[in-house]
Amino acid sequence: PSSIRELRVWQEAVGTAGEIAKLSRKTRPESRALVDLLIRCSAEVALAIARGHVKEGAVAQRDGFRLARDAIASLETGLAIARHAELFPLPACADLGVRAGHTARLISGYITYLDRLVEADAEAARMTPV
């Protein structure tokens, strides 16, 4: 996709971040630190995807998506903590967990695709006579 808005993984990440921000309005003030962490992690996933998407070349794009993979792992961990702390209603926590897992799988798919591009480029460079 030429536009970031067309990228399904970005749409999922933005939707998840938006849902977390909405749910955070209804939390207790003493839970603010965890809520802030979840908002920051979810935003970082979407931002890393966007940064990776606009990079030139498969290696740079892959590096961006690897940062997104790291951020989604942090988000999934934060959501697990939130579930145990009963920060959000249980159905909302379950939905967020499913969405984050789906986003993680999409990110992994993009990294696999970009790994193949990098390998193909390296193979083509080895085959090109100097």
Image: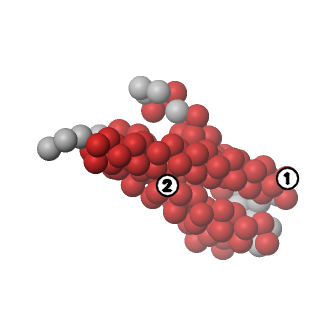
Quadrant of the rendered structure where residue 87 is? bottom right
* SS category of the residue bearing label 2: helix
Front residue (pair 121, 128) = 128
Residue at 35% over, 39% down? 54
Residue 91 circle label: 1
**Is residue 31 in view from this perspective?**
yes
> Within 10 angstroms of label 1, few (less than 14), some, or many (20 or more) residues?
few
Residue at 65% over, 67% down? 78
Quadrant of the rendered structure where residue 90 is? bottom right
Front residue (pair 7, 44) = 7
Image side of residue 100 versus residue 118, left or right:
right
**Is residue 44 in view from this perspective?**
no
Tally the marks: 2
First-in-chain label (1 vs 2): 2
* SS category of the residue bearing label 1: helix
Residue at 43% over, 27% down? 3
Position of 6 relative to 97 (above/below): above
Front residue (pair 92, 124) = 124
User: Which image quarter holds the C terminus?
Assistant: top left
User: Which of label 1 and label 2 is nearer to you?
Assistant: 2
Quadrant of the rendered structure where residue 38 is? bottom right
Residue 31 circle label: none
Residue at 47% over, 45% down? 116
Q: Position of residue 88 (x, y in %)?
A: 77, 60
Q: Position of residue 72 (x, y in %)?
A: 58, 58
> Within 10 angstroms of label 2, few (less than 14), some, or many (20 or more) residues?
many
Distance of label 1 from label 2 (alpha carbons) = 25 Å
Image side of residue 125 versus residue 92, left or right:
left
Badge 2 amino acid: Ala
Badge 1 amino acid: Pro
Q: Which residue corresponds to mark 2?
A: 68
